[in-house]
Image: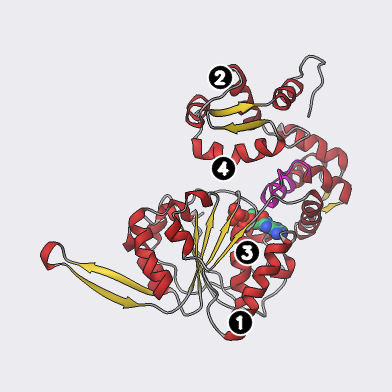
Amino acid sequence: MARQKVIGGDPADSGSGGGGKSLPPGPPSGDFAGGFVPDDRQFDEELRPQRLADVIGQRKVVNRVRIMLDAAIKRAEPLGHLLLDGPPGLGKTTIAMVLAREMGTECQITSGPVLKAPKDLLPYLTNASGGSFLFIDEIHRLPPAVEEFIYPVMEDFRVDIVLGEGLSARTINMALKPFTIIGATTRSGLLTAPLRDRFTFREHLDFYEERELVEIIVRNGRKLRTSINEETAHNIAIRARGTPRKANNLLRWARDYATIHHDQGEINGEIIQAALEMLEIDHLGLEAMDRRYLQTLVTVFSGGPAGLQAIGHTMNVAPDTLEDEIEPFLLRCGFIQRTPRGRVITAAGVEHLGGAAGGRDGRRLF
Ligand code: ADP
């Protein structure tokens, strides 16, 4: 689902449920063609924390962001431009939306790859009201021409528009109302230094601890009108790969499973075990795709080192997807290493694969 929706920021609108009001008509919908495929994100909305106080985990980030926010509100100034970086599903969009709500301002949403030329960005800039937010997801994928166009926007709230071509070309400047750009990236390393430096604040989101995920699962179980105790929530949390998005998706799956197989709203230990088994998620949270990655390294590349592109081609998966979605977790588990010569499977990775496949001792891991 296209995420161009603008969320509103009525500070009185606290608590669960309401996704906020829609403010200015988003820029032309054509801008989003191919931007976002339908995915879990539309369901994310109902579980997204609405206020800063509802955000579980990321304590240090939340504490710093609270100060930026309160200071901006106190001085009645727009928030400084903020860059959020970290793996997918950790809460970058959530924090941007929560901040907009807390500031009582609107938030337009777009993404680097859909802003193909400066003219694609222009409607967002002219729509931006004073103090509002423009959230740019995957900002590392902004084309260079758009990136250069955004520099004077971030620095002076000005756009330079070139009219005509060749000798008759002239530049006109247009003043914008001061507003805030919130950039989100899974690869801050790919951001150019000039762009990175134009952000007043930079925050890095890290993987969640298990107890934080348990808290999120129990709370979201209530929001979904499903009862789940802490022990069962823990069973989900250890497979959630450190991300709330995964935890939410597993919770939803377990709820569906309980509805269909047990006709009940309670998720107990037995249900969770069967539901996760059906998803082929093992006891550490590895999914079929993760195991296929490890298997490819072993069988095709003799354990490595192997280049990311080569692994991607063999698996028929985009290297970007491997790097963003698969590798961070395998690295965290210590199952692969990234060396200058390529990816290498570790002894622990080989051992896990053996177990997961029902290896020598026939032990199954899920
Ligand atoms: P990102 O933008 O980093 O990919 P999102 O902000 O879309 O991640 O978060 C994915 C989902 O995870 C959200 O819909 C929300 O339900 C949940 N979530 C994220 N951060 C938190 C948090 N700190 N507390 C509770 N739920 C969270």
Q: Is the residue under label 3 in contact with that under label 4 (CB below 8 Å)? A: no
Marks 4 & 1, CB-CB < 8 Å contact: no
Picture residue at 62% right of the left edge, 61% below the top: 94
Tell me the quarter of the picture where residue 128 sits. Answer: bottom left
Residue tagged 4: 324
Q: Are marks 2 and 4 in contact (CB under 8 Å)?
A: no
Three-letter amino acid code of the residue under disc 1: Ile
Q: Position of residue 301 (x, y in %)?
A: 56, 19
- The secondary structure that most of the magenta stretch takes on is helix
Magenta span contains residue 339: no
Which quadrant does the C terminus fall into? top right
Whole-number angstrom distance, CA of label 4 to CA of label 3 = 20 Å
Q: Is residue 241 magenta?
A: yes
The disc labelled 2 sits on which kind of residue? Phe
- State how far apart marks 4 and 1 are (Cα): 35 Å
As measured in the structure, the alpha-carbon distance from the residue carrying label 2 to the one carrying label 1 is 56 Å
- Asked which secondary structure carries label 4, the reply is helix
* Residue wearing tag 1: 73
Q: Earlier in the sequence, mark 2 or mark 1?
A: 1
- What residue is rendered at 51% in x and 78% in y? 131
Instruction: Name the amino acid type tagged 4.
Output: Asp
The first of marks 2 and 4 along the sequence is 2
| Nearer-N-terminus badge (4/3) | 3
The residues tagged by marks 2 and 4 sit, at their Cα atoms, a distance apart of 21 Å
Can you tell which of label 2 and label 4 is closer to the viewer? 2
Q: Which residue is mark 3?
A: 95
Instruction: For marks 3 and 1, give the CA distance.
Output: 17 Å
Q: Magenta segment, which residues?
A: 238-253
Q: Secondary structure at mark 1?
A: helix
Circle number at residue 301: 2
Tell me the mark number nearer the camera, choosing from 3 and 2.
2
